[in-house]
Image (cartoon, rainbow, N blue to C red):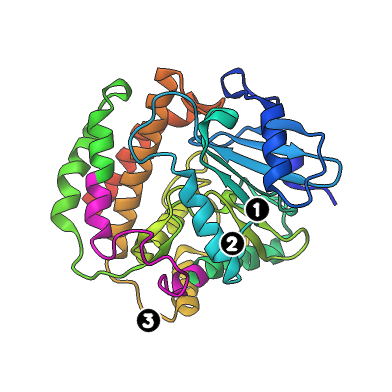
Amino acid sequence: MTSVLEEEGIRPVRAQHRFDEEALARWMAENVDGYGGVMRVDQFQGGQSNPTYRLRTPHASYVLRRKPPGVLLKGAHAIEREARVMTALGQAGFPVPRVHGLCLDDTIIGSWFYVMNLVEGRIFWDARLPDVAAADRRAYLEAMNATLAQLHRYDPVALGLSDYGRAGGYIARQIERWSQQYLQDEVAGRHASMDRLVEWLPEHIPANDEVAVTHGDFRIDNMIFHPVEPRVVAVLDWELSTLGHPLADFAYNLMMYRVPQEIHNGLLGADLAGMALLSEADYVRTYCRESGRRHLPDLEFYVVFNMFRFAAILHGIRGRNLRGTASSANAQEVGDRFALVADLAWQQVQRL
């Protein structure tokens, strides 16, 4: 069986992300059970924030994620949090790769990193699922939806993650965090719609508050599906995970219905019925059923909030590209979309 990860998005390691492979091999021998030696190291094309590598050995393949080189914003690129949450969720039976080890020693490869299994399966880069039979497409979207609802049903205390974030006040803190990162990154520039959102959002935060483990970037290309079944076998990229509001986490996933294909694997403008895909209303109803809810209050606010947050993330990528510290080869293309996403968010506000 060949992993889609091994067929798509693999490139030679970029010059600015190279490291001492012999030092890594020594660390692997001491910290990874079953490591057989003799590695080939390649880099995934994705990984906008944290450089991500494939480590291939004669008997197994692994994935390494590390902090990027260069000057970093405080609190960003916390790969140790990724390793912690995946370990806790894996022990609870949630579909995540197995984490083999975490290294907090900068002298090994130049920055902190962790190593996990390379999970075999399928990754879909297009939410329209053109490579899936039409009769099965709804089942794949329902599986993604149910996996997110499963995550939100966990008790953070039972997972040992009671201190994984501050309980309550998530939305206000997120607005402040991303507003500050946007305003402080002068290199990436400003945009009128983004400035308006920075002012509007704090004044319209819903009163209801909930706490759950949230992924923060839950979308179809951040998970691996079973090779032949509509079933999620691994959820990836936990950099933005925390204790947060589950409806905000769901609204980020739902955002695919509000943006075009080139952004967030969007479905805006797609013939959903003709493609045998779930409508937005059906997708909301599925989450309600899977999470045991009757309705989703203030969902429109959470969609606007997530568009703002996503625009801020793209703004950060734009800034890293302009400073020469971006992790991905297509950082300029991705970062330049931030203004479009900010405009879409402000249009949502005007409709409200």
Q: Residue at the location (57% across, 25% down)?
A: 329
Q: Amino acid at mark 3?
A: Arg
| Image location of residue 124, percent across then percent down | 65, 50
- Reading the chain from its start, which is encountered first: label 1 or label 2? 1
Secondary structure at numbered mark 1: loop
How far apart are labels 2 and 3 at the CA level? 23 Å
**Farthest residue toward the front?**
30
Magenta stretch encompasses residue 78:
no
| Image location of residue 168, percent across then percent down | 25, 65
Q: Residue at the location (55% across, 67% down)?
A: 147
Q: Nearer the viewer, mark 2 or mark 3?
A: 3
Q: Answer left or right for 149 relative to 65.
A: left
| Residue 8 in view | no
The residue under label 1 is 129
Secondary structure at numbered mark 3: loop
Residues in magenta, as a range: 150-176
